[in-house]
Structure formats: C-alpha cells, structure tokens
Amino acid sequence: MVETGILLVQCVDRKGVVAAVSTFIYERGGNIVRADEHQDPEINEYFLRLEWDLTDFSIPLEAFATEFAGLGREFAMTWRVARSSDRPNVAILVSKAGHCLADLLFRHQIGELQCEIRLVISNHDDLRRLTEFYGIPFHYVRLASGGKDAAEATQRELLVQRGIDLVVLARYMQVLSDDFVASYPNRMINVHHSFLPAFIGARPYHRSYERGVKLIGATSHYVTKVLDEGPIIEQDIVRITHRDSLADMIRKGGDAERAVLTRAVRWHLENRILVYGNKTVVFA
C-alpha cells in the first residue's frame, strides 16, 4: 500500500486555511488523496484531516514540524502529523470478562488494527490462556486489600517499560487514580456497557433491566478524571423487549461493547479523531 502522511488540524474557522495547507503540501510534491473537514459554528472552530501520498514528497516527515511551524503559528493551529505506516504500542487492561479482549486480539492478528499489542494486564488470572494463545504477554497484577496504589505502580511501570502509546480498558472493572489517567491524556480508551450518559457507573445492565428499558447500548470514550464522562468516540444500541431476561440483555449488550470498542481503537490508531472540550470529531 502507498504510504501516506496524515495531518490533523484544529483552529479558528477563517478564510484561507484549506488553501494554505493544501498549497503547503502541493509545493513539496505531495498528492492529496483524502480531505475531511468540519466546522462548529457555535464556537467558530474548524477541523481538518488531510492525507497525502508521500511517494514524491520532497521533505522527510520527520522535518515536517519545522517546515510547517510558521503556517501553524499564522493560523494559531493546534495540529499533529503522522504517517499511515505508524504502529503505536498498545496495552490492554481487563478484568474477568473476555469478549472485548478476544475481539481486539483477533482483529489485531488478522491485520485490522495497525498497532503492536505489547501486553495485557489484568487484576484476575482468568484470561491468561486466551491472551497467550495469541502470543501476547499476560501480566496478572493482584489488587490486594488496601494495595491499589502498589498495583497501579506496578501497572504503570509495565506500561513505561514497553513504551505504551495507547491504553485500552476492555471491561477493566476498576476505577483508575487521577494520576494514572493524567499520564495518558486522550490516549486511554474505555468501553462502558450503557448508552452514556444513561446509567453511569456500576451494574448498568441490572439497572436497565429494573427500569424496563427498550434500548440498551454501549459507549467507547476517552478516559478522564470524571468517571464515565470523557469525550465520547462511538456508541451503538440494541433493541430490547419485555421477553428479554437480564442474561439476554448482558449477552446482547456484549455484542455492542465489542463493536464500539474496536471501532474506537481503530479510529484512534488511524488518526481519525480530534478532541475539543468534552467532544470529539471523528473522521471515520
């Protein structure tokens, strides 16, 4: 496949932004193969994802920041650049439920997720065999009574040792400390088993069942210090009837969980997400 450069831009919406960025790429031999944009008129903000063929690009992408800096300052841009061949290092945190983990590992194996899954960390040993079947190192970090700080220190050490770029919480049923979360701003993705903002927190299926809902859902979002209130990346829903038991709801909801988490992770890896405030723009 042709290697491409990917530029993500956010700035005040004003005339000339697209022309300036496109001209910058063109004058250096780049051929634009895809451009996606969005304007938010309420805050007068502009978002752009530009992808171009690097075959005849006259400067190495490592020098892009230096060359583009002047244009970035002119338009007061927040921006970042990547190449399509980048393979970020990923860690997955899980507890006992293995359906989201299994989906991520399988899709990684068949090449749908462009990353290196460096390790899986769990507070239970249940998913070791599944993880090691795919050749991924598994680390059981026990959360002893009163030892959450020590467990988090061990987890963070493992992440640092392996140069982790993205942390995925694949039904990891623990609340992480503010310091842990702050180490991975917009680089930690969680899946919550309800259609947020409904049923935040623990046991949402049980609460949904008790409430007699007709729709359940799942939400993938970036993790912030406020529980289950980070910027939402993807959501999906499943219709429920009076015939569905709690077990039926959990099973059907699990399908939605797998789908939204995998999509969110893939879009993050492909540099398709821009975060602003507590919202996201997803160029899927």
Image (cartoon, rainbow, N blue to C red):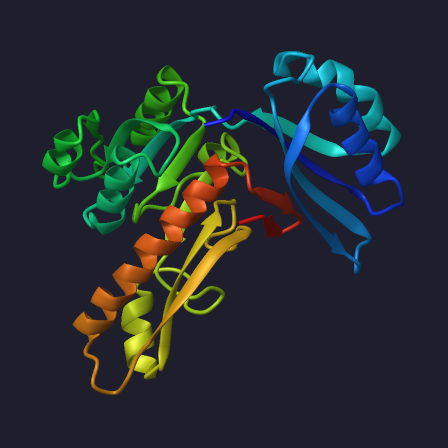
67 relative to 22, above or below: above
Q: Can you say whether 133 is above or below 189 in the image?
A: above
Q: Quadrant of the N terminus?
A: top left
From the top left corner, tell me how far across and down residue 173 is, in percent: 30, 49
Q: Position of residue 275 (x, y in %)?
A: 62, 45
**Which sits in the foreground, 280 or 60?**
60
Count of numbered circles on the image: 0
When asked about the image quadrant of residue 40, the answer is bottom right
Q: Position of residue 115 (x, y in %)?
A: 38, 29
Q: Is residue 186 left or right of residue 30?
A: left
Q: Quadrant of residue 9?
A: top right
| Above or below, 200 relative to 68 | below
Between residue 19 and residue 92, name the one nearer to us. 19
74 and 159: which one is in front?
74
Q: Is residue 252 visible?
A: yes
112 lies left or right of 5: left
Residue at horizontal 32 percent and vertical 73 percent from the top: 207
Of 237 and 49, which appears nearest the observer?
A: 49
Q: Residue furthest bottom?
A: 242
User: Residue at the left extreme?
Assistant: 129
Q: Image point 17% across, 40% down: which residue?
A: 124
Q: Residue at x 36, y 36 (%)?
A: 113
Counting from the top left corner in percent of width and height, residue 95 is at: 23, 44
State whether residue 95 is above or below residue 90. Answer: below
Question: Which residue appears at 17% of the width and 71% of the height?
Answer: 247
Residue 178 seen by the camera: no
Q: Is residue 65 left or right of residue 274?
A: right
